[in-house]
Image: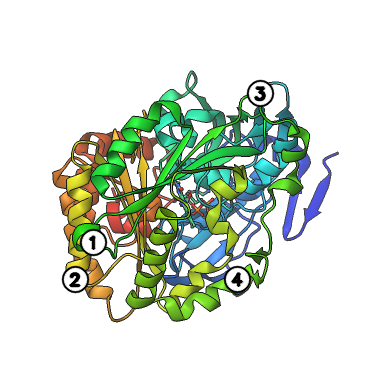
């Protein structure tokens, strides 16, 4: 006799639950489109927000239910992790959001091989905490550890080791994806390979990752050996990146976008290397979770939670000029050519040190513009981007520079070259100017064979985004969208803005 199970709002039959897998989903849903599911959802950059119906399933069956509800009610669904995309990539105004943060279980872990299978809501933070004491580390991490594996795969995130390790997709062995048709597919490089290469980096358009298997990276210490030094120009930064890429595991640069004249383009660079086996004399200690944890107190005195608020008075051109200048001077004097040991967390997740640092940008919020340009043109394009920003007096408070390599994912953002990620304050006063600036900068990128990253986008004009992606890639992706989501159930504000929701 079938057993009826009640979990929260859901009632489902265990025998039927099994049958739901790989079958067309039922047209009925136990979910209701009620006001208690309406929530205000904000982009990470706080530059936009809207009301949506939000559902947080804990099982695959419940995901089926949300799709049934969407069909029944004629609404669309956006997939969302913890929402660390800067703009509208995981938003769906006045429609449904399927948030996968509660599907956050580690399903299998093999400490001998480093293979791990997780649900999509497991975050990078959950992951490193789970594996580090066995001597493993996630092979690719973003600047914040709060990103989920599902959301990271959706955007095919990159780290400061992109030039060497590629994006996270390079380390995904296999995933299960639930399509809006109701079918579940297992994908790897060998099985359903086309879907594998399109869904990774497919900005959540083709289906829901429900289970992912990844290869972790073996480490022999909880510390990295870090080298810090100053660079006088973007050209010099490019030269250093080329010279050091064969013998560095990580490389990242910071550019002072306020500097003018002879100081224009100056910055600081950090490279880091894993320690070899035997180099760390007490690996069991440095590999402890507690050795990696980031302190709640900044410099041992300020509660880091308050830093966002404390920084608010400096959140203007003058304040940020001061902070950028001080950072360069300190780095170019006390910190120049220093080598030191630093934990993986401190090196990788600097921004997590100051929770809510983004609140310094309130009330307007911020946008990030990250473009990727081939190595022989990056100096010219990025110089021009900073010059244009200075000319319009809309100056990025932060500029982060990285070296990249191409990858074989369909909707890729990477090139054989460099990226510059620019953080701009966004407010009533500069809104129109910023839109104009982004369009000018984006056109330059397009003319020079560059690409864009949807995880960081808020203002890209659709014609430029599409031209950079190329008609051929878009046609292939749209054909897959036709197969996986013929009814166009999955739509986000970003896909509406850049691809007209892949309207048929
Ligand atoms: C401070 C900060 C630093 C950052 N640094 C970096 C960096 O160094 N490198 C980098 O690459 N990015 C970086 N990012 C961007 C971030 O890594 C990406 O936006 C990432 O995709 C966010 O993941 P998320 O889990 O929060 O997902 P969300 O932002 O909620 O969603 C991201 C995308 O994935 C889709 N999606 C979510 N879950 C699923 C699922 N289960 N199945 C299918 N699709 C799904 C969504 O529809 C959306 O398109 C940074 C962001 C912040 C805020």
Q: Earlier in the sequence, mark 2 or mark 4?
A: 4
Q: Is mark 3 within 8 Å of ligand 1?
A: no
Instruction: From the image, tell me which residue sits under label 1.
Output: 438
Instruction: From the image, tell me which residue sits under label 2.
Output: 392
Residue that appears at 59% across and 50% down: 346
Tell me where residue 498 appears, x and y as whole percent: 28, 54
Nearer the observer: mark 2 or 3; the answer is: 3
Q: Earlier in the sequence, mark 3 or mark 4?
A: 4
Of the pair 174 and 298, the residue shown nearer to us? 298
Determine contact: label 1, label 4, CB under 8 Å. Answer: no
Instruction: From the image, tell me which residue sits under label 3.
Output: 277
Nearer the observer: mark 2 or 1; the answer is: 2
Residue that appears at 28% across and 37% down: 239
Q: Is mark 2 within 8 Å of ligand 1?
A: no
Label 1, label 4: how far apart the Cα atoms are: 39 Å
Residue that appears at 52% across and 68% down: 357
Label 2, label 4: how far apart the Cα atoms are: 46 Å
Q: Earlier in the sequence, mark 2 or mark 1?
A: 2
Instruction: From the image, tell me which residue sits under label 4.
Output: 34
Q: Earlier in the sequence, mark 1 or mark 3?
A: 3
Q: Residue furthest right?
A: 1
Label 2, label 3: how far apart the Cα atoms are: 51 Å
Label 1, label 3: how far apart the Cα atoms are: 46 Å
């Amino acid at each position: 006799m079938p057993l009826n199970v009640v979990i929260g709002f859901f009632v489902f039959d265990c025998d039927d639950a099994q049958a739901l897998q790989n079958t067309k989903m039922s047209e009925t849903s136990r979910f209701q489109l009620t006001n208690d599911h309406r929530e205000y959802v904000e982009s990470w950059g706080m530059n936009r927000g809207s009301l949506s119906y939000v559902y947080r399933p804990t099982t695959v069956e419940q995901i089926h239910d949300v799709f049934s509800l969407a069909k029944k009610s004629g609404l669309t669904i956006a997939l969302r992790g913890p929402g660390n995309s800067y703009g509208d990539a995981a938003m769906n105004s006045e429609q449904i959001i399927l948030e996968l943060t509660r599907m956050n279980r580690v399903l299998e872990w093999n400490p001998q091989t480093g293979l791990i299978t997780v649900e999509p809501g497991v975050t990078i933070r959950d992951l490193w905490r789970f594996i580090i004491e066995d001597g493993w580390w996630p092979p690719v991490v973003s600047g914040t550890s709060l990103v989920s594996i599902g959301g990271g795969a959706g955007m095919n995130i990159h780290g400061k080791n992109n030039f060497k390790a590629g994006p996270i997709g390079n380390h995904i062995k296999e995933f299960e994806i639930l399509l809006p048709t109701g079918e579940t597919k297992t994908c790897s490089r060998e099985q359903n390979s086309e879907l594998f290469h399109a869904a990774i980096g497919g900005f959540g358009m083709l289906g829901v990752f429900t289970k992912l298997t990844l290869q972790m990276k073996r480490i022999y210490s909880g510390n990295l050996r870090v080298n810090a030094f100053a660079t006088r120009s973007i050209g010099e930064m490019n030269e250093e990146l080329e010279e050091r890429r064969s013998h560095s595991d990580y490389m990242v640069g910071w550019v002072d976008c306020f500097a003018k004249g002879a100081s224009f383009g100056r910055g600081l660079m950090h490279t880091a290397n894993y320690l070899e086996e035997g180099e760390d004399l007490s690996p069991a200690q440095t590999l402890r979770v507690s050795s990696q944890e980031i302190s709640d107190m900044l410099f041992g005195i300020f509660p880091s939670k308050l830093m966002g608020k404390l920084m608010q008075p400096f959140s203007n051109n003058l304040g940020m000029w001061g902070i950028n200048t001080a950072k360069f001077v300190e780095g170019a004097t006390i910190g120049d050519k220093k080598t030191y040991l630093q934990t993986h967390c401190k090196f990788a997740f600097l921004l997590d040190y100051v929770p809510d640092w983004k609140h310094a940008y309130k009330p307007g919020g911020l946008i990030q513009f990250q473009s990727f340009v081939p190595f022989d043109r990056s100096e010219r394009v990025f110089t021009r981007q900073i010059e244009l920003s200075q000319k319009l007096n809309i100056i990025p408070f932060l500029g982060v520079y990285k070296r990249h390599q191409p990858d074989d994912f369909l909707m890729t953002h990477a090139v054989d070259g460099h990226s510059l990620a620019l953080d701009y304050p966004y407010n009533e006063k500069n809104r129109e100017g910023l839109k104009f600036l982004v369009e000018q900068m984006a056109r330059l990128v397009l003319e020079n064979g560059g690409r864009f990253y949807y995880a960081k986008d808020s203002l890209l004009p659709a014609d430029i985004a599409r031209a950079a992606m190329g008609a051929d890639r878009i046609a292939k992706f749209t054909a897959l969208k036709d197969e996986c989501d013929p009814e166009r159930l999955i739509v986000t504000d970003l896909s509406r803005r850049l691809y007209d929701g892949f309207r048929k």
